[in-house]
Image (spheres, rainbow, N blue to C red):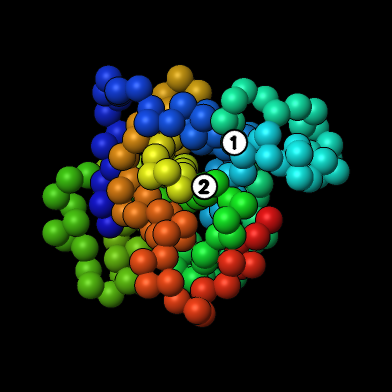
Amino acid sequence: MTTPDLEPQPQPLPEDPALAAAVLEIESHVAQAGWDQPARLYALVDTAELVAQEPALAAMMAIDGPGEDGSFTPIEQDGLPPGQALEEALQTIAWPDSVSGCAAVIERLVLPPGADDELPDDPTAAELFAREHPDRQEVRMVAGVTRAGASYCALRLRAHDDEQSVVDGTELVPGLLELLHATLHDPHDSPHDSPEQGQA
């Protein structure tokens, strides 16, 4: 269990402003439903291509034009298998070429630096330890990546639940970003990975 860097810091310009906009849009949308939500997964599709190739879907989503050049439209995927962690589910997903990127939303308990050394080895005991730790923080993480290799994240603490306190940057949750990148670029090109699994 790693502790993300939650201190606001000056950030360089995003690698991909369109990806940053999509991640922040997802974060804001999910935040409206409050806390204690299940993990969510989104396909990121090029808005102009969506309007051209899927006009009915675009109309249903109230998209009446291509938007800004290179912008992404997030399309939420069906619910993850019950009882399966998002990190496990991501290892079974390969997106079709029509998907330009993807994003995931998860809520986690994070502990202060040094607390990991005290974590029990048993997963159930470790979860209980984290839930009862006096310095625990509940955080919602939104991470997004593109086929071009860009990444962006947005973090919101339950203890500071307002738009002004959202922390964003390119590499805030590297483990999750790595898993998301792998769904777009399968290094083994496994025949068992079905593109349809990630299809919107």
> Is there any visible trace of residue 170 in the rendered image?
yes
Mark 2 in CB contact with mark 1 (< 8 angstroms): yes
On the image, numbered disc 2 is attached to which residue? Answer: 101
Q: Where is residue 24 in the image (x, y as percent from the top left)?
A: 52, 31
The 10 Å Cα crowd at callout 1, few under 14, some 14 to 19, many 20 or more, is many
On the image, numbered disc 1 is attached to which residue? Answer: 72
Label 2 is placed on what type of residue?
Gly
**Closest to the observer: 138 or 186?**
186
**Closest to the observer: 128 or 33?**
33
| 112 left or right, relative to 151 | left
The 10 Å Cα crowd at callout 2, few under 14, some 14 to 19, many 20 or more, is many
Is 75 situated above or below 126?
above
Is 139 situated above or below 20?
below
| 180 left or right, relative to 198 | left
What residue lies at 23% left-to-right and 72% top-to-bottom? Answer: 121
**Closest to the observer: 180 or 153?**
180
What residue lies at 16% left-to-right and 60% top-to-bottom? Answer: 118
Element marked by disc 2: strand
The mark nearer the N terminus, 2 or 1, is 1
Label 1 is placed on what type of residue?
Phe
Element marked by disc 1: strand
